[in-house]
Image: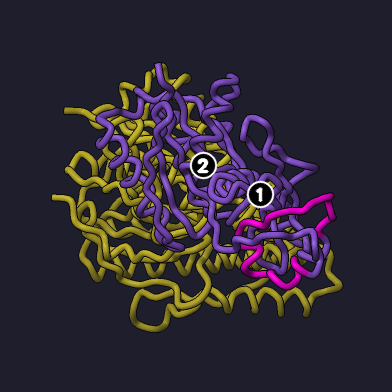
């Protein structure tokens, strides 16, 4: 039987809610981003994030139910992000979500945020079959994972220092693009000359599937300093930086596909919204006579839809959380149970 | 018909839920500084099943709106929002400081109470309350967060209640001197007092909708803007 699940995401600085119906698909979603509020502080202020979540979450749920034309009696379960993320921010979504489920008399499930991202490409459109290689690439993570099914994740490699998205934001800061500057850096890179600078591709000459991105930021800083009299240097540095990240990700993805003898590459997380990176990974997958799968751009960054979806899969498999409300700010993907 | 109100409080080290039916209040209370999220819904569930009631059969949900620990405030507010929205119930906010004042009045018959909760960073959340002729605490002046030695003097004498008197006993004694006649520094807000105070609000028709179950932090300067 199909189930309708409400999903709530509040792990960082976006409050997202969505409703997903198994066998049908996404019925609706909505999101409030706090990015503008945090921008003036140069990063997410956890206490302010929590204070904002607790003001937004019920009105967003109420608006969404109204918009999709569902009454609360039609909801069969509630999913909320239980980690990883900011403790206080997670706590808001978990307390509201778990209690709402109790109030409605339906089961609830705490969802792993990164599983949400990882499964987002399966939410709609052309859906990849298991097994596949997943690249999770965001402000907090850069991981290559072999996925054999829901909850069957094998970590193949990850960043040993900065996440790719973090490197974008830090380099953007060097370029005076504010916070979070990743998307602005990509915009600037469009005007850059791709042949002027060649940044290193870190760790590609070593075996294995780990990444390192902190050196690129230093390389960018040095390049800027050496050319400080050039007013157009920013765009060229942005372009060289973006190409280096895209190329490094692509080289490791190709290696992961070859070593695992798989053809399907699934890419998710905030950085997967980047068009140059998408194009590069698409190229790599096709070069391996395979296919690359991406979520639609708005589901690359944090959103409620991926939580409703992952929660629906787990509720449908009979999982549910007890009355104790649990959140895990640190929570390895490998600890998740498999869904059979 | 007698009113039925559920009350929730997780804003200090105490974690409690209470169910008021008419004049009777049953409470679950534990001191569990890190276990609020684990315990609060099981407490609610136990109270309801013992009374053979469902959430939807209640009239309202009362909650401690603070001041108190920021995380604790949001656990209460989040749980109350979820329960109230889910069951279609109104909510009733009650001050943690008023709850402390009310408890001391019921236990020790003091009618003038200075309630103070340790606010960390060397400060206390505090408010003066006088018990009115209906036996309810009425705020004198405003609730505030300040250094214990900056408390504004009010004509007393006053009895002191709350963790502020445990953490800053000497400072508060020094500041209030002969104005302070009795101290209960171990007092914590209890859901049973929240429930009783909420009943009065409910009878006056003073209720809010679920999304209005919001914390009162008092301390709003939580970040120093970078230049």
Residue designated by label 2: B193
Measure the C-alpha gap from mark 1 to mark 2. 20 Å
Find numbered disc 2 in the image and state the secondary structure of the residue it sits on.
helix
Horizontally, residue B20 falls left or right of residue B137, namely left
Q: Read off the magenta span.
A: B151-173
Q: Is residue B202 above or below residue A269?
A: above
Residue B148 on image: x %, y % = 76, 64
Q: Nearer the viewer, residue A189 or B10?
A: B10
Horizontally, residue A98 falls left or right of residue A131, namely right
Q: Residue at x 41, y 20 (%)?
A: B2
Find numbered disc 1 in the image and state the secondary structure of the residue it sits on.
loop
Residue B185 on image: x %, y % = 60, 63
- Where residue A20 is drawn, which disc sits there? none
Residue B172 inside the magenta-drawn segment: yes
Pinpoint the chain carrying mark 1: B
Q: Nearer the viewer, residue B170 or A57?
A: B170
User: Chain A appears what colour?
Assistant: yellow
Residue designated by label 1: B217
* Classed neighbour count for the residue bearing mark 2: other residues with Cα under 10 Å, few (<14), some (14–19), many (≥20): many
Q: Which chain is purple?
A: B
């Amino acid at each position: 039987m199909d189930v309708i699940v409400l999903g709530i995401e509040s792990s960082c600085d976006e409050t997202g809610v969505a409703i997903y119906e198994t066998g049908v698909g996404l019925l609706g979603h909505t999101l409030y981003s706090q990015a503008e509020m945090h921008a003036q502080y140069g990063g997410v202020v956890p206490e302010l994030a929590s204070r904002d979540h607790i003001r937004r979450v019920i009105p967003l749920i109420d608006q969404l139910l109204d918009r999709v034309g569902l009454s609360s009696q039609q909801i069969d379960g509630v999913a909320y992000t239980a980690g990883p993320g900011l403790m206080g921010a997670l706590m808001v979504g978990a307390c509201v979500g778990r209690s709402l489920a109790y109030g409605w008399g339906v089961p609830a499930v705490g969802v792993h945020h990164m599983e949400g991202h990882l499964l987002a490409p399966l939410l709609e459109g052309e859906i990849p079959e298991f097994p596949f290689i997943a690249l999770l690439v965001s402000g907090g993570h850069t991981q290559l994972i072999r996925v054999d099914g829901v909850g069957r994740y094998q970590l193949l490699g990850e960043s040993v220092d900065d996440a790719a998205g973090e490197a974008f934001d830090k380099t953007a800061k060097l370029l005076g693009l504010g916070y979070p500057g990743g998307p602005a850096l990509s915009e600037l890179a469009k005007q850059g000359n791709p042949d002027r600078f060649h940044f290193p591709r870190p760790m590609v000459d070593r075996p294995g599937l780990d990444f390192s991105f902190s050196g690129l930021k230093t390389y960018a800083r040095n390049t800027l300093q050496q050319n400080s009299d050039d007013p157009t240097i920013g765009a060229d540095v942005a372009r060289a930086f973006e190409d280096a990240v895209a190329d490094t990700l692509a080289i490791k993805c190709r290696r992961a596909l070859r070593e695992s003898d798989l053809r399907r590459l699934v890419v998710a997380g905030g950085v997967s919204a980047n068009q140059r990176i998408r194009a590069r990974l698409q190229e790599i997958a096709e070069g391996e006579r395979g296919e690359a799968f991406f979520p639609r751009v708005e589901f690359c960054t944090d959103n409620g839809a991926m939580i409703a979806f992952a929660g629906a899969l787990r509720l449908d498999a009979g999982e549910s959380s007890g009355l104790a409300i649990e959140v895990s700010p640190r929570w390895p993907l490998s600890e998740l149970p498999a869904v059979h | 018909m007698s009113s039925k109100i559920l009350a929730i409080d997780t804003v200090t080290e105490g974690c409690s839920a209470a169910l008021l039916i008419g004049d009777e209040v049953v409470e679950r209370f534990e001191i569990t500084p890190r276990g609020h999220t684990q315990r609060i819904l099981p407490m609610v569930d136990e109270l309801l099943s013992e009374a053979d009631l469902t959430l939807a059969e209640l009239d309202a949900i009362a909650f401690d709106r603070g001041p108190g620990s920021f995380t604790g405030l949001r656990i209460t507010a989040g749980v109350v929002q979820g329960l109230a929205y889910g069951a279609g119930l109104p909510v009733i906010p009650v001050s943690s400081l008023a709850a402390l004042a009310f408890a001391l009045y019921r236990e020790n018959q003091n009618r003038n109470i200075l309630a103070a909760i340790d606010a960390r960073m060397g400060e206390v959340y505090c408010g003066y309350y006088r018990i009115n002729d209906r036996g309810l605490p009425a705020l004198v002046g405003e609730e505030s967060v300040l250094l214990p030695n900056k408390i504004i003097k009010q004509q007393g004498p006053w009895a002191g209640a709350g963790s502020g008197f445990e953490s800053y006993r000497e400072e508060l004694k020094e500041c209030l001197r002969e104005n302070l006649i009795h101290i209960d520094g171990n007092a914590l807000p209890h859901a049973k007092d929240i429930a009783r105070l909420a009943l009065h609000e409910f009878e006056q028709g003073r209720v809010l909708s679920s999304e209005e179950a919001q914390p009162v932090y008092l301390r709003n300067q939580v970040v120093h803007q970078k230049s």
